[in-house]
Amino acid sequence: MDRQKLLEHLKELQNLILQEREAARALAVEDMLALTEQKEELLKQMLPVVDSVEELSAEERELAESVHSENLRNAYFFWSALQWVRESMSFISDQLHPDSYGGSGSMYAGGCSGALISGRI
């Protein structure tokens, strides 16, 4: 009985991970948060089942490896998205605070503070 439960939990976890990736692609933050809660709850339910199983069968091992692989894909996807956001914010910040020159011809970083873009001019 525990083995059947473990397979069901692994399949459900894999499904949640795939749904999480789709929600992330669609930028559906509320759906992502709900899926995260579901995953946490499922992992809590899985803990006693996993502890009771001595060794994984070939089918369980294959499914567990698939879950691990899909989870790594999501982690890389989220990391890549975060890097893109950081690069975009850096680019925007550079555009808002471009270098300027003082009266003596010296260069000042961020001298004009983006006044033109912010509408203060």
Image: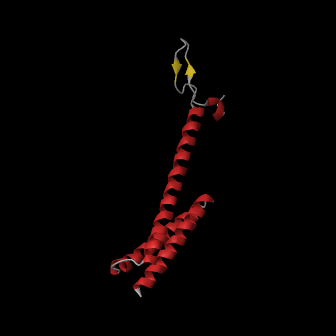
User: Which of 116 and 38 lies nearest the eye of the viewer?
Assistant: 38
- Quadrant where the image shows the C terminus: top right
Place of residue 35 in the rendered image (x, y in percent of width and height, measured from the top left): 53, 68
Q: Is residue 56 above or below residue 25?
A: below
Please name the residue shown 50% across and 52% down the image. Answer: 79
Q: Which color scheme is applied?
A: secondary structure
User: Which of 116 and 87 lies nearest the eye of the viewer?
Assistant: 87
- The outermost residue toward the bottom is 1
Place of residue 28 in the rendered image (x, y in percent of width and height, measured from the top left): 60, 61
- Quadrant where the image shows the N terminus: bottom left
Please name the residue shown 50% across and 55% down the image. Answer: 76
- The outermost residue toward the front is 58
Please name the residue shown 55% across and 13% down the image. Answer: 105
User: Which of 44 and 53 lies nearest the eye of the viewer?
Assistant: 53
Q: How many marks?
A: 0
Snapshot quadrant of residue 22: bottom right
Place of residue 104 in the rendered image (x, y in percent of width and height, measured from the top left): 53, 11
User: Which of 39 and 114 lies nearest the eye of the viewer?
Assistant: 39
Drawn side of residue 34 relative to residue 52, left or right: right
Drawn side of residue 63 relative to residue 51, left or right: right
Please name the residue shown 52% across and 64% down the image. Answer: 33
Drawn side of residue 49 relative to residue 32, left or right: left
Q: Is residue 93 above or below residue 9?
A: above
Place of residue 113 in the rendered image (x, y in percent of width and height, measured from the top left): 57, 29
- The outermost residue toward the top is 104
Q: Is residue 89 above or below residue 10?
A: above
